[in-house]
Image (tube, rainbow, N blue to C red):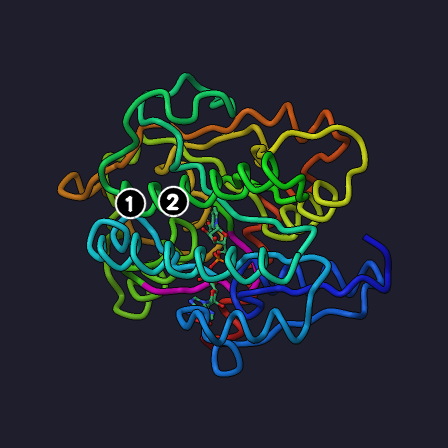
Amino acid sequence: MNKKSKILVLGSRGLVGSALMRELFAQGYLNVLSPLRPELDLFRQAEVENYFSIHRPDYVFMAAAKVGGIFANDTYRADFIFENLLIQQNVFNAAFKSKTPNLLFFGSACIYPKNAPQPMKEDSLLTSPVETTSEPYAVAKIAGLKCAQNFRKQYGLNWLTVIPANLYGPNDTYHSQNSHVIPGMIARMHEAMKNDDAEFKIWGSGKAKREFLFVDDLAKACLHFISHQGEKPDFLNIGTGIDIEIFELAKLISMKMNFQGRLVCDQAMTDGSSRKLLDNSKIESLGWFPKILLEDGLDIVIKEFKTKNA
Ligand SMILES: NC(=O)c1ccc[n+]([C@@H]2O[C@H](COP(=O)([O-])OP(=O)(O)OC[C@H]3O[C@@H](n4cnc5c(N)ncnc54)[C@H](OP(=O)(O)O)[C@@H]3O)[C@@H](O)[C@H]2O)c1
């Protein structure tokens, strides 16, 4: 990737897309296109084909998707499979027709089998069933990964996939029900504090473990991977190699937000998989390592959240 390459970031207003924009500008890439939905609706095949045929990007980062936490995945099951497949097929189709040489697709840790050995290696993919709550989303993501992989195999294109751990960072979606673990917990704890609640309900047993990656670390890994010149795999994990119990995470967030009440576990809510730790050895062998510790990343996002919700 050189500084004149034409780079297209899809989903540039989202958590991952906006981190990619920050990193691209920080590294001096100036020829970056970042159309938002009103300019380019990825549900519309003709619109997507037309955009690609006019702009002919050298690099595409596919950070647009239907995304959400465990509750949203389980509630809007049809939307999660249908919208993701639709966006993916429209983008792959247009990228292929306009001969896009480099493309990065985003998978998710939930594509691995529910019972995959921990930490999860890339070769666990498709060895047994995935977790039921996120199955529709996972099936769409597996289809996207397989599309990129087989376009690479058949046509020699540099179409790759990253499989990030749970992400958090600036520009996240803070919704009490539909968000991922960290933004959802911050939003619900903020509500509890506003209501002077004596207790805060943690979803599930609190014993499930999750791995969290600050999104700016992911953005650096994406640029590192796509522009790596040597031999590289079709897809790889990107995480920190460290996970934490949900109860411990809630304790950390409550300390940082100064929530004085009790933390209780709501066993009526599902835990999802008990553990989802990624094996990071492939990306580390290419020379990328995470830099931002969970403690520090939480300080950044809680400060951003408080500023926006003062
Ligand atoms: N967040 C995580 O923890 C996580 C973890 C692993 C993998 N990932 C993957 O990373 C990628 C990015 O996720 P994210 O967390 O950044 O999601 P996000 O914050 O929800 O951003 C998604 C973006 O996609 C855009 N989009 C959705 N449908 C569109 C359409 N029809 N036309 C145009 N734009 C559309 C959204 O635009 P609007 O703003 O207009 O809605 C939004 O900007 C996804 O593929 C996701 O699966 C995320």
Tell me where residue 50 appears, x and y as whole percent.
55, 75
The answer to whether marks 1 and 2 mark residues whose Cβ atoms lie closer than 8 Å is yes
| Quadrant in the rendering for residue 89 | bottom left
Q: Give the residue pinned by disc 2.
A: 250
Q: Taking 34 as reference, is 215 above or below it? A: above
Q: CA gap, disc 1 to disc 2?
A: 8 Å
Q: Tell me if 104 is positioned left or right of 111 in this view.
A: right
Residue at the spot 31% in from the left edge and 22% down from the top edge? 128
Q: Disc 2, ligand 1: is the CB inside 8 Å?
A: no
Label 2's element? Answer: helix
- Point out which mark residue 263 bears: 1
Tell me where residue 259 appears, x and y as whole percent.
38, 56
Q: Tell me if 283 is positioned left or right of 75 in this view.
A: right
Residue at the spot 22% in from the left edge and 57% down from the top edge? 76
Viewer-nearest residue: 209 or 14 = 14
Residue at the spot 49% in from the left edge and 76% down from the top edge? 47
Viewer-nearest residue: 262 or 23 = 23
Label 1's element? Answer: strand
Tell me the kind of residue under disc 2. Answer: Ala
Viewer-nearest residue: 168 or 24 = 24
Q: Please give the range of residues in magenta.
A: 168-175
Q: Is 171 part of what is drawn in magenta?
A: yes
